[in-house]
Amino acid sequence: MCRHLGWLGADVSVSSLILDPPFGLRVQSYSPRRQKHGLLNADGWGVGFFDDGVPRRWRSTAPLWGDTSLESVAPALRSRCVVAAVRSATVGMPLDVSATAPFTDGQWLLSHNGVVDRGVLPLTSTAESVCDSAMLAATIFSLGLEVLGETIAQIGSLDPNARLNILAANGSRLLATVWGDTLSVLRRDDGVVLASEPYDDDSEWEGVPDRHLVEVTAKGVTMTPLDEPKGS
């Protein structure tokens, strides 16, 4: 149910992160190597990046593998902080741009890899779409990213079948949760990549254990276990 990637570090091109690598998001859109749910991600793509602190987005409902417009422009798009995703829509969810990650509250860019029962989420008028991922994003934004770990643990306790891998960025921080799906981290000399699966065969990729919160800042990478609320 989707693949996503986040970058924090030096100013790099979007193309170098999602199109150029041998197993980048473009390849993951039709041939993911570690995806446990679904065979491909053909229901759209989205790229978000920060431009002088302002989050910008480019989203589409077309498969990434055939989008020549992005291929033409991506080498010229550069940023120190990027969030990108390819989508495999949950059955019954709308197939439109507003349902495609990354979502934003004007400060953060956020992607959700997984599925969640919308019935456990509070109703909010700020969701960009009625799809589960957009409603989850609106819930996280309303509660604040500072309590992301607690929010995910609480929702996970309410929906035991949920898969709640979140990737969020505000230009100077990357936050991610691993809850039911895969996430890997690559510490490069010029920055850090968080990705649903490695975009190449570099031996330095490290798998993040399930039910962990990951934070990336200029100081480095920290991982914190996530526990369900007591009594859940």
Image (tube, rainbow, N blue to C red):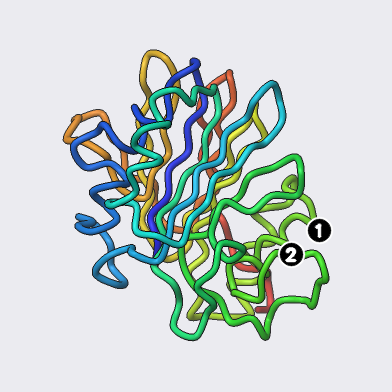
- Quarter location, residue 75: top left
The kind of secondary structure element at disc 1 is: helix
Mark 1 nearby-residue class (10 Å; few <14, some 14–19, many ≥20): few
Using residue 121 as the reference point, say whether residue 191 is left or right of it. Answer: left
Contact (CB < 8 A) between labels 1 and 2?
A: yes
How many marks are shown on the rendered structure? 2
Residue under the point 55% across and 76% down: 116
Say which quadrant the C terminus sits in: bottom right
Q: Residue at x 40, y 55 (%)?
A: 86
Mark 1 is on which residue type? Ser
- Hey, what amino acid is under mark 2? Thr
Residue found at x 54% / y 77%:
94
- Residue 125's x, y, as percent? 83, 70
Q: Which residue is mark 1?
A: 142
Q: Callout 2: 10 Å neighbours few (<14), some, many (20+)?
A: some
Front-most of 85 and 98?
A: 98
Q: Is residue 55 above or below residue 161?
A: above
Residue carrying label 2: 139
Q: Position of residue 56 (x, y in %)?
A: 63, 37
Is disc 2 placed on a helix, strand or loop? helix
Q: Is residue 149 left or right of residue 101?
A: right
Nearest to the observer: residue 177 or residue 45: 45
Q: Position of residue 98 (x, y in %)?
A: 62, 63
